[in-house]
Image: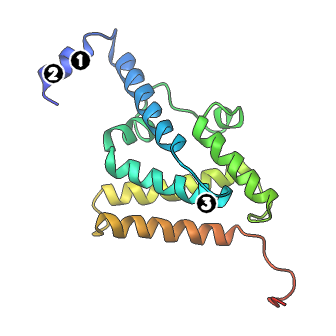
């Protein structure tokens, strides 16, 4: 954005921090709309689709992604207080789906917040590496990589069989 346009935009705010807060609020609203659009058959399907939505958000809307997950905007949520208090609408949804998957027997017991953070951290790391040019993957290949990584994580977090691998 040209400097003159940035100045015109920012003059409606008292300071840079207020401008960043407004940008952050708008970006988080866009992220929440993306999550709210997910239609899934069950908790694990929702987790998979939300993971893909995160990777797509990083690729499709990098400025908003940064406002949500990279920049300090004064509207970002902080671990552990804000997440434990359910102040993050999306992490709250992820924790609820983790709990549902645990109740369905699809995920092993564990702290839903910590499991949500594991999933988020994995995807965030992949997204940041891709955006930094560390991957030479086309969009579809990158999204496939993210999906495979999520599948591995979900498989690792699945309850382990106690019958010695016997499936009968």
Q: Which numbered disc covers residue 82?
A: none
Residue shown at the point (70%, 67%) measured from the top left: 157
Q: On the rendered image, what quadrant is the N terminus found in?
A: top left
- Image quarter of residue 25: top left
Mark 2 packing: few (<14 Cα in 10 Å), some, or many (20+)? few
Identify the image quadrant of residue 62.
top left
User: Do the residues under discs 2 and 1 have CB atoms within 8 angstroms?
Assistant: yes
Q: Secondary structure at mark 2?
A: helix
- Report the number of numbered marks: 3
Q: Earlier in the sequence, mark 1 or mark 3?
A: 1
Disc 2 to disc 3, how far (Cα)?
A: 43 Å
Q: Quadrant of residue 3?
A: top left
Image vertical order of residue 28 relative to residue 134, above or below: above
Q: Is residue 75 left or right of residue 88?
A: left
Residue at left 77%, top 57%?
110
Determine crowd level at label 3: few under 14, some 14-19, many 20+ residues with C-alpha closer than 10 A. some
Which residue carries the number 1 mark?
9
| Spot occupied by residue 158 in the image (x, y as percentages of width and height) | 72, 69
**Residue 134: percent from the left, percent from the top?**
31, 64
Which residue is under mark 3? 45
- Contact (Cβ within 8 Å) of mark 1 with mark 3: no
Spatial CA span between label 1 and label 3? 41 Å
**Marks 2/1: CA–CA distance:** 6 Å
Please tell me whether mark 1 sits on a helix, a strand or a loop.
helix
SS state under label 3: helix
Q: Nearer the viewer, residue 14 or 146?
A: 146
Is residue 132 at all visible to an observer of this figure?
Answer: yes
């Amino acid at each position: 954005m040209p400097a003159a346009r940035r100045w015109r935009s920012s003059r409606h705010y008292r300071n840079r921090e207020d401008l960043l807060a407004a940008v952050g609020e708008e970006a988080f609203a866009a992220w929440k709309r993306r999550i709210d659009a997910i239609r899934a058959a069950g908790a694990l399907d929702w987790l998979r689709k939300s993971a893909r939505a995160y990777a797509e958000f990083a690729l499709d809307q990098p400025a908003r992604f940064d406002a949500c997950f990279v920049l300090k905007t004064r509207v970002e949520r902080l671990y552990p207080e804000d997440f434990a208090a359910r102040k993050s609408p999306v992490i709250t949804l992820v924790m609820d789906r983790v709990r549902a998957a645990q109740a369905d027997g699809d995920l092993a017991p564990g702290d839903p917040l910590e499991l949500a953070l594991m999933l988020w951290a994995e995807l965030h790391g992949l997204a940041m590496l891709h955006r930094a040019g560390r991957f030479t993957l086309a969009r579809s290949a990158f999204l496939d990589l993210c999906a495979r990584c999520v599948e591995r994580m979900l498989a690792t977090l699945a309850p382990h069989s106690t019958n010695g691998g016997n499936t009968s």
